[in-house]
Amino acid sequence: MWERREVKKQGKRQLLRNWAAMVAVCFILAFSGAEFAQSADFIGEFNPAAVLPDDQVVIQEVSLSNWELLLEWLHIDPMDGTHPMWAAADQSFGPVFDTLTAPFSAFFALLERSDFAGWLDITLACAGIAGGIWFSVWVLSALTVGARRFFLESRVRDNISIAAMFTPFYRGSWWNVTKGMLLRSVYTILWACTIIGFPIKFYAYRMVPYILAENPQARPSEAILLSRQMMDGNKWRCFVLDLTLYLHWAFLPTLLASILGTGIGLLTGRILLCQSIATAAAGLLSLLFVNGYKSATYTALYAALRQAQIEADAPLAGLFTVPAFGEAAPEGPRPKLPDADVHLPEDPVFHFAQQHKLNYNRRYSIRTLILLFFAFSIAGWLWEVALHIVTKGMFVNRGTMFGPWLPIYGAGGALVLFLLRRLFTKPVATFFVSMVLCSIIEYFTSWYLEVTKGIRWWDYSGYFMNLNGRICLEGAVTFGLACCAVVYFAGPLLGGLIDKLSPARQNAICAVLIALFAADAVYSHFHPNAGEGITDYNDWQADGADAEAAAALTASNAPRHG
């Protein structure tokens, strides 16, 4: 019988041995929305009024939850007394609905801004639903299982790479893993309709991702049945484990940070600033420690339950295929058990790339870099146009130029491939250096455009950890993740396709694209692309100047006494 104190002890030990890698994996899960998304909420909830003067605060729209958007679209007010069932659902089912529909938030954002008056809105709504379902089922679920694989391997192996979390995306196991996670979600949703059965089955299916992580070829129905057997008699104890982790590492730190921030704010007169710092501190604690600690603790719990099934000679114990996963985690700050004694399968570093012959460490010719520059520029333009359609419900030709390209994306991707090749064997270093490089490009591009054109095409003044409104943490993280995708997948894949073209065709395509781009650049220099949806980013400098001018005019027209 496992002990709560022991699994926590093993979790702490595992986290200390592999802190950087585990934090990186949890960081990817949080910002992709697969798990731990609430630990990154402090970035979006940052209050710019805490650090900026009133005339420099970008006014942002208040976002409604998916549940509130659905009720608003159905013209239902659960608080008006005429819908008692909806009022009860608003209290109990609303948070669950928001969690289950988190991958479809883009669709609900479109729902908020659209009256569904035409076929375009309906088509966009359907595309949003389809895209959300695809991303949730085919990407996030597999990423969740892959993270479990990383946690299991990091428990018994030294120097494990974070690329182990992409294990489900190769060896032909992706489809089986997603089927298993989809079946688990369907069962959970169906049991949620009974209300009483939801918490029971929530814990009954708790071990499914770990089982699929250890044995990606396991039949989904057998994985679910084995999870039920493993959790039989352990649901309440697991609930108590969750409760202690929540109270000790989520509730109490947040409460103490809030009290301390409010107290210091009252003493200094900067309540909003101190509260924002306290909220950020609690969020950083989750990102840098709590998420990894919880993941390692649950991994130790799986190992204990797994060993109990093997000792009991359970019928489905044959699904456990890696003997080392049941061994006790090594003592000390670093594992004493060498890799050779663990007998794990080969470390899955970039196996997807190797299986598909994607050489991430390849060299790119000048022609290939030029073509990749345009490919990434066009992809960036499509991304921003699509994002604007989803969030604003309208098409806008984004960027300073008139062609379908955003050079800042192309420059970032091409420069990373050209300058950072020596770092490609170190994904974490590639991520952070790409963040810095792309932030430098974005900052000086914004500065140059404002100096030469007198216009700001973007302004992050109300965002968390921004620098002069030109760059911010959220944008830097997004660029870092995108550059990793470029380095390890998009670059080698597109580079391989380009290599299949003859040099003559490559030269011809380069010449045509460069000519069109040069013509667009010359025209845009004298007539930059500007207007609604392009440069209407609440330029607080202009707003502040207008406010000062209005105040001065009012003062000059005021009656004078004396």
Image (tube, grey):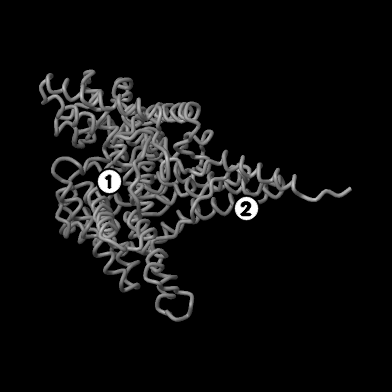
Amino acid beneath label 2? Ile
> Residue 95 in the image: x percent, y percent?
41, 63
Task: Determine which quarter of the picture holds residue 344.
Answer: top left
Is 232 situated above or below 551? below
Towards the viewer: 166 or 89:
89
Amino acid beneath label 1? Leu
Is 332 situated above or below 197? above
Towards the viewer: 85 or 325:
85
Q: Residues within 10 Å of mark 1 (few under 14, many from 20)?
A: many
- In the displayed structure, does residue 266 sit left or right of residue 157? right
The CA span between labels 1 and 2 is 37 Å
Q: Residues within 10 Å of mark 2 (few under 14, many from 20)?
A: some
Circles 1 and 2, Cβ within 8 Å, touching? The answer is no
> Residue 254 in the image: x percent, y percent?
54, 52
- In the displayed structure, does residue 239 sit left or right of residue 157? right
SS label for mark 2: helix
Residue 161 seen from this side: no
User: Residue at the right extreme?
Assistant: 562
> Residue 396 in the image: x percent, y percent?
35, 45
Q: How many marks?
A: 2
Residue 181 seen from this side: yes
Task: Determine which quarter of the picture holds residue 97.
Answer: bottom left
> Residue 224 in the image: x percent, y percent?
21, 60
Which residue position is annotated with label 1?
Answer: 143
Is 29 situated above or below 447? below
SS label for mark 1: helix
Q: Where is the N terminus found, in terms of image quarters?
A: bottom left
Identify the mark nearer the N-term, 1 or 2: 1
Which residue position is annotated with label 2?
Answer: 259
* Residue at figure coordinates x 41%, y 57% from the top left: 241
